[in-house]
Image (cartoon, rainbow, N blue to C red):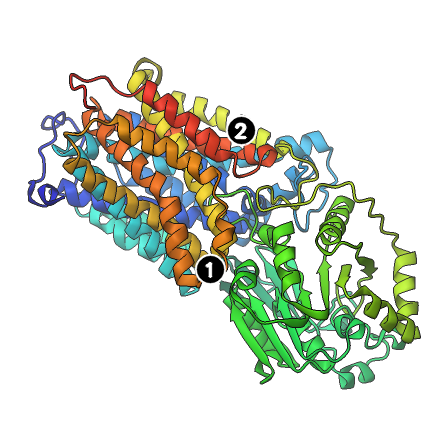
Amino acid sequence: MAEAQTTPDPVPKSAAPGSGITDHLPASRTAALFVISVLGLFLELLLIRWVSTEIRIFAYLQNIVLVVCFLGLGMGCWDSQKRFRLQDILVPLGILVTLLSVPFTRRYLGNISNLLGGISDLVMWDWLATGLNPIIASLIGVALTLGLMVLLWEIFVPFGRLLGRLLSDHPNPIAAYSVNVAGSLLGIWLFVITSALDLPPVAWFVTFALLALYFVGSSQSKARDCLLLVGIIAVSSLAGWDPGYTETHWSPYQKLSGRALNRDEGNGEIGTFRINVNNANYQEIIDLRPETLAKRPDLYPLAQRGLSQYDLPCKLHPNPATVLIVGAGSGNDVAGVLRNGAKRVVAVEIDPVIIEIGRKHHPEQPYADPRVTVVLDDARSYFATTNEKFDLIVFGLLDSHTTTAMTNARLDHYVYTRESIARAKDLLTDGGVMFLSFFAERPFIVDRMSRTLAEVFGTKPLVFPVVSSNYGRGGDIFVNGDLDAVNRQIDADPQLARQIREWQNAFVINTPGTTSVPTDDWPYLYLETPSIPSLYLVFAAALLVLFLYGRRRLGSTEFHSRWDRSSWHFCLLGAAFMLLEVQNISKAAVVLGNTWVVNAVIISGVMVMILLANALAGWAKRMPVWPVYVALVGSCLGLYFVDLSRFAFLPYATKAVVVGLLTSLPMLFSGLVFARSFEVAPRKDAALGANLFGALVGAILQSVTFVTGVKALLLIVAGLYLLAVVTRPRTNSAKV
């Protein structure tokens, strides 16, 4: 690494004066490489977040945006002989920003979720039928999606073009690659900081523009580039604005829009304040104070008074001394147990902005009550770290509208696995009760929940629906624990018994117990059977169309003619590395939690391992590479047999170190293999392009987890690395 600091900026090898290949770039090529790396990663994360927010189907398929970015970067690297122009990024980016910022076009594109939702066997929240013929609706949805994919691809081709050229021209390829990784690491944390501060998209694009100014200074068209940047910032100021809502927040996880409700308008509104998440109805803040109910008997029928879904937990287990609520949200569940005499309440919520909305707008002010302790954490993480016992554990409506970083699992998936429910059961006191509410949109989800609870507790749960009313949105209720005590409470309260019977008669629930139980290895709550959702296959076909478009658009035939043994090697390394990263994030989520901080730290840890591998590569030049391959494949196979959840009982800092070291070992060996191969690759741009194509393939291969489970990825990774051994670049040195 010291050598990288003293090496002067290189003179481009293949850019003769006036050739236009790397003309009009800053004088320092190393600095340009660093800035373009920061800019590229920052913009990639920005668009993954934003597109997934405004077009909800991408929130469930976040990897699609990632894959398209990789395709653009990879094809750009292979096309690095062409000139880099900043405007080639800014023009398609400006079009995309306009489409996602202007309310009319944003709402129109938001219908993609409804157009494609009918062909999906993957449950999506708030899906509405379009009224169109399903085939026509699907074709329109695919066409609109493909148009967005083309824009994303166009944005990232110039990034790949410049990255490939700068890496190829550098005299020290490992040092250059380290600069690229370090810049990417900074790009990650720049976006993490903007997310942590709850900044809106206009702030994201101001940050982007400030970084892009580095290239404006050496551009031939400074005025045009500046005008484009100013236009992007101006248009992005409209992002998130919705005439129907009075406030919009951008939390680390999602976009939250809110507005006060007026039930006197007779439009069927429930509650006093509505919260939308990513443009879908999410929850209402409901005022169930006795004085409020007494004032409006027309809205709150006497027969159900005191029996809302938020009051029911304490009706089934009266006067609990300690209550744990996971998915506390804006405070309805917390207010319910406080009204019914709970003495201590621990409210766990992953999104800090939802808590603040509850503090600001909930008329009962549950989070200001001294009996309440608020914990900002993932529910699964809290289960693992607490030793406190609870008389009553309430699962609020945790139903997630987004996936976690780089995996197929939604934020709530690991909360409802058999292992998670078993850990929650361990937190119950003798005679304790678990009360789980869920808005199940498909019958198999109800059966899955019921069977999971039955397996964990050894007895079938009490299951009944709650009908939507002014008392709450309703949903399906699952109760387990001390069911004898629960049944005694129901028998002793005629009003409660009558109400439950009415609900059960109104909506008959069948729980045959035939649906598979979600586990930490197969956590896909919303997928009926182990299979690849049809929507993923549709997107794979769209990706193939995009690739063919890209080849024609770039006017290059080199993708086939320049693909050789070395290309296969780097492609395999990229695919294996992507799958390994996905597997590590999934495993860490089980032990450390599924928070944005954990995901950022894990991905950053991967980058640090690459930098460490690059530093060690120079020291280990004289050593043969085969022991590294053995260690790489061996560490992947070793992780297959290690159950990281066994470390969940350790103090958080200790288990973070243990889990980090175990999952990082393969990353270190993989980085060493890549560094050794990259150093001897005849064309660095082609090598990086093939590696990015491999990452794209890995992101697509990730879909096999829907069938095999997450752990099987390690076997696939080991197989890919073995194939990489066979295809490694040939050199004159036997030690490579």
Residue 536 in picture, x, y percent from top left? 58, 33
Q: What is the number of callouts on the image? A: 2
Q: Is residue 106 left or right of residue 678?
A: right
Closer-to-camera residue (237/426): 426
- Mark 1 lies on a secondary structure that is loop
Estimate how packed mark 1 is, as few (under 14), some (14 to 19) or many (20 or more) residues with alpha carbons within 10 Å. Answer: many
Q: Is residue 418 left or right of residue 587?
A: right
Residue type, mark 1 in image: Pro
- Mark 2 lies on a secondary structure that is helix
Residue type, mark 2 in image: Ala
Any mark on residue 23, and which?
none
Q: Is residue 452 left or right of residue 189?
A: right
- Quadrant, the N terminus: top left
- Quadrant, the C terminus: top left
Closer-to-camera residue (428/509): 428
Q: Residue 323 falls in which quadrant of the image?
A: bottom right
Q: Earlier in the sequence, mark 1 or mark 2?
A: 1
Q: Is residue 38 above or below residue 268?
A: above
- Gap in angstroms between the C-alphas marked 1 and 2: 29 Å
For the point 11% across and 32% down, which residue is it?
A: 171
For the point 57% across and 68% down, which residue is it?
A: 348
Contact (Cβ within 8 Å) of mark 1 with mark 2 = no
Residue 443 in picture, x, y percent from top left? 78, 46
Q: From the image, tell me which residue sits under label 1.
A: 252
Q: From the image, tell me which residue sits under label 2.
A: 540
Q: Is residue 369 above or below residue 621?
A: below
Residue 225 in picture, x, y percent from top left? 27, 46
